[in-house]
Image (cartoon, rainbow, N blue to C red):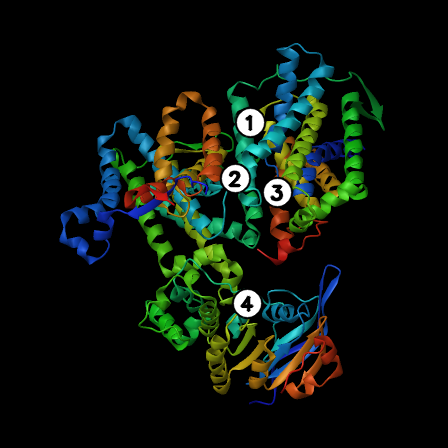
């Protein structure tokens, strides 16, 4: 039973990690490998606001989310503009940017027990005989909310559908007059903001350090790839598969095996069925 | 009538000496011969002499630069076939662990472990990556990124092959300058061999695969097999570097799979100019000493490599080597237009 | 000309998403035959070629070559068996000299098997092939960068690339598109010569006058379906074909 509860919570957290990444990719086909870095950067930003500028939490957190969103927007115009369209260059540039951010943070000494964000609420309750703290429940709630909102946005609003159509055929969209670069930068901005939102909610659960940035990127990639990069329902299923896989691995083999699950999943899925479980783009398999 | 503004354009002309040195007439004058030979001979002599001349510390830096250089060459070769690897650490680590394990558990000497690690490493890397050669560049890159991380975590969690502590007290290479010389020689051999290979018909087919794989497929060539061959050659090069490192430091540990070993070769090749091999070598010779002299900055170094990588990708796609080559062969003049 | 079919397509269907590009298409090709495939733009001609040569997998149906099913085989395997195609959009390597473009097919295992040529002879073979194609050996033309050649030469280079593989079945996808009348006039005899030497040829063309002069049989496609099959005369007198081409009259 506890497996079920922890598995669900873990899966929702994974989905929360992935939402920002998926949104950016879904709208503009941009794979943001700086995703994990933006996540940790949010934490750093909130911590600095709280402990160095002594701002109240209710200002520090939203301010950070907005700042990170703007940061994503700026990154697009500064770095990605000239390599837009060359998927490989986009990957290298975003990944290098992400690594640079994470390593700089580590160099500045941003690790250790004093770096943590305060919980929203203390205390907990029992669900089905399993003790759960309120923070985790809030995380689960937020995660569910965001995923549902994303799903509705992408599948049911006109803007969402337009974006999806755009992602599938950029040239047609351009000819209809949609400015690809504005869409691209906005999608990166929103994806970044979602990453930072996830950070706001999840980071209080533990300590913050740069290594987590890499882990979040790996989790987001794994969920996106396992579920299929173009499908929101795939993302949900993917997060549950990896979430439960992780919890099971932690329970039955050992806690250190948790990170191995998503890593293996990425490699196996790409080797065997690259379009993922729900992917519609079979061209990944038919073509190099 | 409107006065037209004087406008200028850049005009590039071959230098006189290049034209004179272009064909067999080069042998007529020592100046032309020097012009042709100098760019090739200078680095060769430099690399041959340096291990004797440098101090202990900088000698170590040279060795380090050659190791990274081998990884950069390996990356460049794969890139010439259309395979973009973000996981050079994978090749390095496989070679390092094969040599390390053979040395630790069987006490074999480097003379035996290194060839086995090189060839075996090449085979293993090609085999492990063969299921993903048919994927698009981005996805292949992702897998190469994940593989060293996976191996690192697996070694850490299972504790196999020394686990987090690694394997130490391994058999060393011969003392003195011989040890360093081995890697310098192999490095130079690789530069010349790769350059030769890519300019022969074999390399022609490889580059064609990168440029238009469907056209090559329609010419009845099995592109996947060719890519696997490329993986073998590149993997063996990286594995040699790993095996060398293992015996040079007499230690192998999880750190051989570190991100550093994956990023710097790409930055070096991007900086020096992808596709030229000389560029990859030049890039490593610049970046490694640079990073050593900035050692005090610690983690900042990786941020700097990343910065260089980003700038190279965005602003300087042709790389330093092409720029230098162009400057050597041509000069520029502003010419008035209209 | 043999009586049996060496190449057969049976019930080919191809869907791209919701669009049916090829609908229940079957045909057979005899050894040494010269088959023309015509039809309006978008009728599925190139898709058919892609299906036969393995670049696209059919949703259903089979392709059989000399008794062996080749439906799911890789493009390079099928080319290695002797079914060679050209591309509508010329796919050459423009940054290489013209003759170097031929090195690639000459490096294939098929050619190694058939020619048994030694390493180093490839350059000579390439220049020879181009000479046959009208690129004079003694001129500088074979050595010029492919990107600097005029369009007609590029098309012939593409043809040379295909012939370098010593095909058993040659599939030409709009070889004459973009060629001037004089270039067509100089290339067509070459194709006829190959046909006389026994090569089985499938030719997709829009230039019907030239096509009808050389083919034995014609296949007409429209909306992915075969709407007529027969000699050029029979086919051009079919109602369905006339409707498809809307008033184009060709004196056969």
User: x, y (%) of residue B245?
Assistant: 38, 36
Quarter of the image with the N terminus of chain A is: top right
Quarter of the image with the C terminus of chain A is: bottom right
Report how far apart the C-alphas of labels 1 and 2 lie in the structure.
19 Å
Q: Are marks 2 and 4 in contact (CB under 8 Å)?
A: no
Q: Earlier in the sequence, mark 1 or mark 3?
A: 1
| Mark 3, residue position | A264
Which mark lies nearer to you, 2 or 4? 4
User: x, y (%) of residue B280?
Assistant: 38, 42
Q: Chain of mark 4?
A: C
Which mark lies nearer to you, 3 or 4? 4
> Could you say which is closer to the camera, residue C64 or residue B117?
C64
| Mark 2, residue position | B148
Which mark lies nearer to you, 1 or 3? 1
Report how far apart the C-alphas of labels 2 and 3 lie in the structure.
11 Å
Q: Are marks 2 and 3 in contact (CB under 8 Å)?
A: no
- Residue at 68% over, 24% down: A66
| Mark 1, residue position | A102
- Residue at 52% over, 50% down: B129
User: x, y (%) of residue B320?
Assistant: 37, 39
Say which element carries label 1: helix
> Could you say which is closer to the camera, residue A48 or residue B11?
B11
**In the image, A141: left or right of A211?**
right
Q: Chain of mark 3?
A: A
> Could you say which is closer to the camera, residue B151 or residue C240?
C240
Which mark lies nearer to you, 1 or 2? 1
Q: Chain of mark 1?
A: A
Q: Quadrant of residue A187?
A: top right
Q: Label for residue C87? A: 4
For label 4, the crowd category at 10 Å Cα-Cα, with few meaning under 14, some 14 to 19 and many 20 or more, is many
């Amino acid at each position: 039973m506890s497996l079920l509860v922890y598995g669900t919570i873990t899966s929702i957290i994974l989905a929360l990690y992935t939402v920002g990444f998926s949104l950016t990719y879904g709208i503009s086909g941009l794979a943001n490998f700086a995703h994990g870095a933006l996540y940790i950067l949010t934490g750093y930003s909130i911590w600095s606001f709280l402990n160095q500028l002594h701002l109240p939490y209710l200002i520090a957190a939203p301010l950070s989310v907005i700042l990170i969103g703007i940061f994503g927007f700026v990154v697009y115009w500064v770095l990605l503009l000239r390599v837009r369209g060359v998927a490989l260059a986009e990957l290298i540039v975003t990944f290098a940017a992400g690594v640079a951010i994470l390593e700089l943070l580590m160099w500045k000494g941003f690790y250790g027990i004093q770096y943590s964000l305060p919980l929203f609420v203390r205390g907990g309750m029992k669900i089905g005989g399993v003790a759960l703290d309120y923070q985790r429940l809030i995380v689960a709630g937020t995660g569910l909310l965001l995923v549902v909102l994303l799903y509705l946005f992408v599948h049911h609003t006109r803007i969402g559908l337009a974006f999806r159509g755009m992602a599938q055929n950029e040239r047609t969209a351009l000819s209809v007059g949609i400015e690809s670069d504005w869409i691209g930068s906005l999608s990166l901005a929103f994806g970044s903001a979602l990453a930072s939102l996830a950070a706001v909610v999840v980071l209080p659960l533990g300590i913050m350090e740069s290594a987590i940035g890499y882990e979040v990127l790996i989790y987001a990639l794994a969920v996106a790839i396992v579920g299929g990069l173009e499908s929101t329902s795939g993302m949900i299923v993917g997060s549950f598969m990896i979430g439960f896989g992780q919890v099971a691995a932690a329970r039955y083999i050992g806690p250190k095996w948790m990170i191995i699950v998503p890593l293996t999943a990425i490699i196996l899925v790409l080797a065997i069925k690259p379009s993922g479980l729900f992917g519609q783009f079979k061209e990944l398999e038919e073509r190099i | 009538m409107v006065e037209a503004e004087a406008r200028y354009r850049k005009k590039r002309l071959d230098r006189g000496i290049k034209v004179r040195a272009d064909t067999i007439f080069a042998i007529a004058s020592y100046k032309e011969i020097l012009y042709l030979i100098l760019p090739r001979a200078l680095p060769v002599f430099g690399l041959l002499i340096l291990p004797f001349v440098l101090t202990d510390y900088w000698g170590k830096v040279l060795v380090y630069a050659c190791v990274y250089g081998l990884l950069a060459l390996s990356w460049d070769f794969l890139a010439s076939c259309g395979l973009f690897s973000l996981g050079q650490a994978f090749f390095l680590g496989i070679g390092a662990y094969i040599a390390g394990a053979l040395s630790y558990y069987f006490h074999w000497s480097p003379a035996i472990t290194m060839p086995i690690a090189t060839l075996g490493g090449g085979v293993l890397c090609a085999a492990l990556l063969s299921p993903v050669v048919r994927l698009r560049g981005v996805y292949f890159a992702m897998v190469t990124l994940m593989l060293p991380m996976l191996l690192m975590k697996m070694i850490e969690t299972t504790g196999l092959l020394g686990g987090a502590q690694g394997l130490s007290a391994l058999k060393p290479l011969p003392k003195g300058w011989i040890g360093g010389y081995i890697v310098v020689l192999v490095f130079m051999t690789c530069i010349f061999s790769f350059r030769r290979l890519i300019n022969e018909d074999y390399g022609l087919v490889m580059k064609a695969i990168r440029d238009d794989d469907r056209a090559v497929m329609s010419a009845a060539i099995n592109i996947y097999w060719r890519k696997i061959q490329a993986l073998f050659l590149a993997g063996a090069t990286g594995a040699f570097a790993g095996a060398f490192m293992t015996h040079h430091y007499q230690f192998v540990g999880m750190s051989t799979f570190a991100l550093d070993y994956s990023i710097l070769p790409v930055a070096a090749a991007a900086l020096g100019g992808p596709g030229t091999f000389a560029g990859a070598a030049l890039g490593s010779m610049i970046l490694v000493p640079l990073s050593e002299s900035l050692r005090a900055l610690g983690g900042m170094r990786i941020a700097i490599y990343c910065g260089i990588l980003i700038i190279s990708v965005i602003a300087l796609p042709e790389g330093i080597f092409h720029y230098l080559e162009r400057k050597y062969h041509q000069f520029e003049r502003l010419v008035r237009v209209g | 000309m043999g009586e049996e079919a060496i190449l057969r397509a049976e019930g080919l269907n191809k869907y791209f998403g919701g669009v049916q590009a090829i609908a229940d298409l079957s045909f057979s090709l005899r050894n040494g035959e010269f088959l023309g495939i015509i039809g309006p733009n978008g009728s599925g001609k190139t898709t058919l070629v892609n299906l036969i040569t393995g670049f696209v997998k059919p949703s259903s149906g089979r392709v059989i070559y000399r008794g062996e099913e080749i439906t799911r085989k890789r493009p390079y395997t099928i080319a290695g068996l002797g079914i060679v195609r050209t591309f509508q959009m010329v796919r050459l390597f423009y940054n290489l000299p013209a003759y170097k473009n031929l090195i690639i097919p000459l490096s294939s295992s098929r050619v190694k098997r058939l020619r048994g040529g030694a390493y180093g002879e490839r350059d000579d073979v390439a220049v020879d092939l181009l000479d046959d194609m009208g690129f004079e050996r003694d001129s500088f033309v074979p050595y010029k960068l492919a990107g600097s050649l005029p369009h007609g030469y590029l098309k012939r280079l593409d043809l040379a690339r295909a012939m370098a593989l010593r095909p058993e079945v040659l599939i030409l996808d709009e070889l004459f598109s973009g060629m001037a009348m004089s270039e067509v006039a100089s290339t067509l005899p070459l194709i006829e010569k190959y046909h006389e030497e026994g090569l089985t040829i499938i030719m997709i063309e829009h230039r019907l006058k030239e096509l009808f002069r050389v083919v034995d049989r014609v296949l007409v496609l429209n909306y992915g379906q075969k709407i007529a099959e027969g000699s050029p005369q029979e086919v051009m007198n079919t109602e369905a074909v006339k409707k498809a081409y809307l008033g184009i009259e060709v004196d056969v």
